Amino acid sequence: MLLSVTLAMVACGGQKQPEPLPASSVTIPVFDPDSAFSYIERQVALGPRVPGSAAWKQCADYLATTLADWGLTVTRQTGNVQAFEGISLPMQNIIASYKPESKKRILLCAHWDCRPWADNDPDPANYHTPVDGANDGASGVGILLEIARNIAGKEGPALGVDIILFDVEDYGVPAFREDLQEDTWCLGSKYWSRTPHTPGYNARYGILLDMVGAPGATFYPEGFSREYAPAIVEKVWNKAHQLGYGAYFPKGRGGYVTDDHLPVNRIARIPCIDIIPMDTECEQSTFGPTWHTVNDNMQHIDRATLKAVGQTVMAVVYEEK
């Protein structure tokens, strides 16, 4: 999907299970993985959402219209960003706000654009093929759409929630351009972090979802998340274990990943964590075998993984006071 990663992985072996947490005092909706799957499928059916393409324009309209139809306040933040070698790209960050009047807020985010190149594909002939981005992009968006559908209902959470779908996350320098070493990832989140949709915007914390749909995915606590938002890491991973999803959320130490949470932490100064897979056994990529390949398609999206991530995040949001 996106990013460069500093590998610093330590698996968590022989660790005791945490003590059970107190039962929730609020009614938490049941996350529907079939619904989330359908939202992912709808995005992928449009084609690769490469910035400026017809599929990208259609997907932006679909996302904004769907969120607005549920009664959320939708803002389309448009502009242009500069990629490597001075390439100018159109950008649309799509923001959906629940209880926009509330000063107490939580930020949930994912990126919705697609990688223009399958530059990690085993076959070099595919390097210049855009990826479908089923896992790398659409999976996080699909989970957030299902959460949005629930929070827009009658029994929403106590706090305000902003769901931000960042654009132009995955336009970083392709791996086959070894002559370029520019930091060209996460352009939409950098844009928003410098110029948020609401002047002076702040949130209690943020949760970023990236590549959250692969079968058997393991989400180790990512390095920058532990550095900038350790309490939120603990909150989310404890909740996952309480709900029975500990196998998806092992309590080891993941690597440091350049992702959309970095601008949110460093520029917007909002503590934000990244739920992103760390595959300790895949030789092709730390992010799994389909990362930045032509195989990042619907065949590799798993409802059980969507359920584990979606129900965990939903519970965390609803239990916030």
Image (cartoon, grey):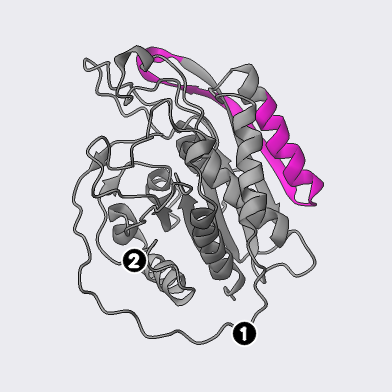
Q: For residue 84: magenta? A: yes
- Quadrant for the N terminus, please: top left
Task: From the top left corner, tell me how far across and down residue 61 is, in percent.
Answer: 72, 31
Q: Name the residue under label 1.
A: 25
Instruction: Give me the residue at 53% from left, 33% from top.
Output: 167
Q: Residues within 10 Å of mark 1 (few under 14, many from 20)?
A: few
Residue furthest to the front in view is: 299
Q: Give the range drawn in magenta.
A: 58-87
* Nearer-N-terminus badge (1/2): 1
The answer for how far apart the CA atoms under marks 1 and 2 are is: 24 Å
Q: For residue 263: magenta? A: no
Q: Residues within 10 Å of mark 2 (few under 14, many from 20)?
A: some
Residue 18, placed above or below residue 267: below
Task: From the top left corner, tell me how far across and down residue 249 is, in percent.
Answer: 38, 63
Task: From the top left corner, tell me how far across and down residue 289 is, in percent.
Answer: 33, 37
Residue placed most toward the observer, 230 or 222: 222
Q: Quadrant of residue 148?
A: bottom right
**What's under tag 2, amino acid-wise?**
Pro
Element type at marker 1? loop
